[in-house]
Amino acid sequence: MSSIDTARPAAHATGVPPRLRFPGSFVWGTATAAYQIEGAVDEDGRGRSIWDTFTHDPGRVIDGTDGDVACDHYHRMPEDVALMAQLGLGSYRFSIAWPRIVPTGSGAVNRAGIDFYSRLVDALLERGIEPLATLYHWDLPQPLQDAGGWTNRDTANRFAEYAAVVGGALGDRIPTITTFNEPWCSAFLGYSSGVHAPGITDNAAALAAVHHLNLAHGLGAAALRAELPATGKVSLTLNLAVVRAATESPADRDAARHVDGLANRIFLDPVLNGHYPEDVLDDLRHITDWAFIRDGDAAAINAPIDLLGVNYYSPTRVAAATPALQAEMSGRWVNDPMSTDGPSPFPGTDLAVSVPQDGPYTAMHWRIEPGTLTELLLRVHREHPDLPLMITENGAAFDDVVEDDGAIHDSRRIDYLQGHFAAVHDAIAQGVDVRGYYVWSLMDNFEWAWGLSKRFGIVHVDYASGQRRLKDSAVWYRDVIAAHGLN
């Protein structure tokens, strides 16, 4: 018997023709990440990742949980793909766990790991769901971290080898393969604020990690091109930011320029323009001499991509790091849900701090402002007009309540998604080439430093039993997909 509960009407369904219709080729999907849903961390030859280590270090995860089981997707994959088909998804974005494919990060390939993702891809294709695979969604093999992780230049070479393995094994059936998901998080939350694995707090290390992640993307893209068929596409996903100054003071405006460099241009410029932004290099020479950037790196990083994935949730507000603000911070970290009453360090720099914004908020205390997504897309299109874009993540965590009859009436999530869908439609109407939208997330899952305490899914997961239940947002999204637009 299936553990999926689907027998509920959508709270927002109207049955009228859509008011905002999307282009005919527009793709509707959902997204997940391997460590957040798979579980089975010690099965079928999977190696240990930095997140296995991090989550088993007491105090690292807010609720003390880990991803050892998570949603048990590794065992429930056929059931989950059937659920995607019920929702009418056109595409599913998932990540491949590097430790499942190359358990020690280099060397021997684990056939069982390839076979799992091969079965997933085939199951998707059988149901007319296009797979979009991400090679790296933060689960670095622990042996590579033991050798320095992303501060070690050699990790970029190991990533290229891994990319070639996946491209050769699965590239014939996956139309688009993404090298990295949100390298900003890997570098700055992993090596500066320390709130993500591997939990290091060193701004110089974070900046070295940025470069080696960029280099790994370029080397990985080239390795994929050598393995993929002529029709295969290569992409990169960045969590780009709309950065605002806390005040109109020259100091705060300069802090916003600086943070825009760290959040956006330190990735966009080398990947798409072939060089790092000079102002960011100059700003941070007191932290690093940038000696890890070598001749030839710029050309390698500037490997062509076919598509840019954009992950977006909330705008960012920053101020100059004055002594008074620094005194207020007292160990807070950026995006900490407990720090909304005061400033928190902006990762990777001592020149700017993140400051609270007014609501409305999601359960993550992230400001809800859909129009900023339009603003961001217009900016990227203005600077790179020929580059196709894809919304590879957007969604919201709320404190969902399971009613006595099993219903989850998550109207706030529906409102959040509807507002952001409309924002993308507005960008398309203004000429931005946005090819599709992947809701984060298909199902509730392990939310990194917040553990199992935050629920982003349109499908509810009972972590004790594994049962999946469609929230009202899932049925509403099914209707949006069917109508190819919004009421």
Image (cartoon, helix red, strand yellow):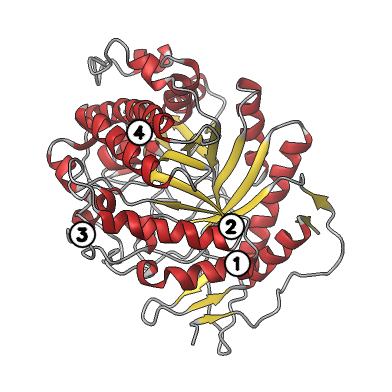
Q: Bin the neighbour count of mark 4 within 10 Å (Cα to Cα): few under 14, some 14-19, many 20 and up.
A: few
Q: Residue 167: image x %, image y %?
A: 39, 40
Residue type, numbered disc 1: Ala
Residue 321 place in picture, x, y as percent: 37, 29
Image x and y of residue 247, in percent: 54, 30
Residue drawn where x is 41% and y is 12% of the image: 278
Q: Give the residue type that dot 2 points to.
A: Ile
| Residue at mark 4 | 324
* Residue labelled with disc 3: 45
Q: Which residue has dot 1 on it?
A: 85
426 to 360, vertically: above or below: above
Closer to the N terminus: mark 2 or mark 1? 1
Q: Secondary structure at mark 3?
A: loop
**Contact flag, marks 2 and 1 (Cβ < 8 Å):** yes
In the image: residue 178, left or right of residue 62: right
Return the disc, 3 or 1, that comes first in the chain's sequence: 3
Mark pair 4, 2: CA separation: 53 Å
Task: Tell me the quarter of the picture where residue 303 sits.
Answer: top left
Give the spatial CA distance, label 2 vs label 1: 7 Å
182 to 299, vertically: above or below: below
* Up-down relation of residue 435 to residue 31 (above or below): above
Q: Specify the label residue 129 is tagged with.
A: 2
